[in-house]
Image (spheres, helix red, strand yellow):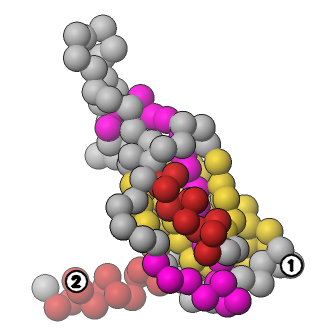
């Protein structure tokens, strides 16, 4: 068991090469946002964060952020036809003042049958995370992956 744990520690940094100054931490995740279409927002003020927090459908106040040092990036995937869709970080890297963040969107293995009388309700996945404030642009790219 100790050997497997040590191997996991060694492998994880290779699988997720994001540096601490490019990607700090996820601050919110939801599958019940209030945004129906795909959208990415870079938040640079407390007021913008208040509005984004409402769009995320989060309960309670947003976290306190030092916007002189950090920005908040919120990515809304838009409406998905059923439960089981999720967003996860895959990679973050910077080049010439542009931060690229790759997200994996997991898809449910079995799609709902829309001919049934009671189909699953749609979901609206979204994720929010902190990045260094110095980037002139943030690009978010999503890739679909099947969940097993």
* Quadrant in which the N terminus is drawn: bottom left
Please identify the quarter of the rendering in which residue 74 is found: bottom right
Residue 129, image x, y percentages? 53, 71
The magenta stretch is 63-83
Residue 75 magenta-drawn?
yes
Q: Main secondary structure of the magenta part?
A: loop
Decide which of tag 2 and tag 1 comes sooner along the chain.
2
Residue 55, image x, y percentages? 52, 52
Q: Is residue 87 left or right of residue 78?
A: left
Instruction: Residue 65: give its label.
Output: none
Q: Residue at x 66, y 84 (%)?
A: 67
Residue 3 shows in this picture: yes
Instruction: Residue 4: give its label.
Output: 2
Residue 100 shows in this picture: no
Check disc 1 and report the residue beneath it: 96
Residue 46, image x, y percentages? 61, 75
Query: As rendered, which of 64 and 102 lies closer to the eye?
Result: 64
Query: As rendered, which of 36 and 146 lies closer to the eye?
Result: 36
Q: Is residue 121 above or below residue 27?
A: above
Is disc 1 placed on a helix, strand or loop? loop
Q: Residue at x 50, y 83 (%)?
A: 64
Q: Residue at x 61, y 43 (%)?
A: 38
Q: Residue at x 30, y 16 (%)?
A: 113
Q: Is residue 137 left or right of residue 125?
A: right
* Circle 2 crowding by C-alpha within 10 Å: few under 14, some 14–19, many from 20: few
């Amino acid at each position: 068991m100790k050997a497997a744990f040590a191997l996991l520690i060694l492998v994880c940094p290779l699988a997720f090469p994001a540096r601490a100054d490019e990607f700090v931490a996820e601050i919110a995740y939801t599958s019940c946002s209030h945004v129906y279409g795909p959208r990415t927002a870079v938040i640079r003020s407390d007021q913008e964060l208040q509005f984004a927090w409402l769009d995320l459908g989060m309960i309670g106040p947003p976290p306190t952020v030092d916007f002189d040092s950090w920005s908040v990036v919120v990515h809304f995937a838009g409406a998905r036809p059923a439960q089981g869709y999720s967003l996860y970080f895959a990679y973050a890297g910077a080049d010439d003042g542009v931060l690229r963040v790759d997200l994996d969107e997991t898809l449910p293995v079995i799609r709902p049958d829309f001919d049934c009388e009671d189909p699953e309700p749609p979901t609206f996945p979204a994720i929010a995370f902190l990045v260094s404030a110095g980037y002139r642009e943030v690009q978010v790219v999503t890739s679909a992956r099947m969940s097993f």
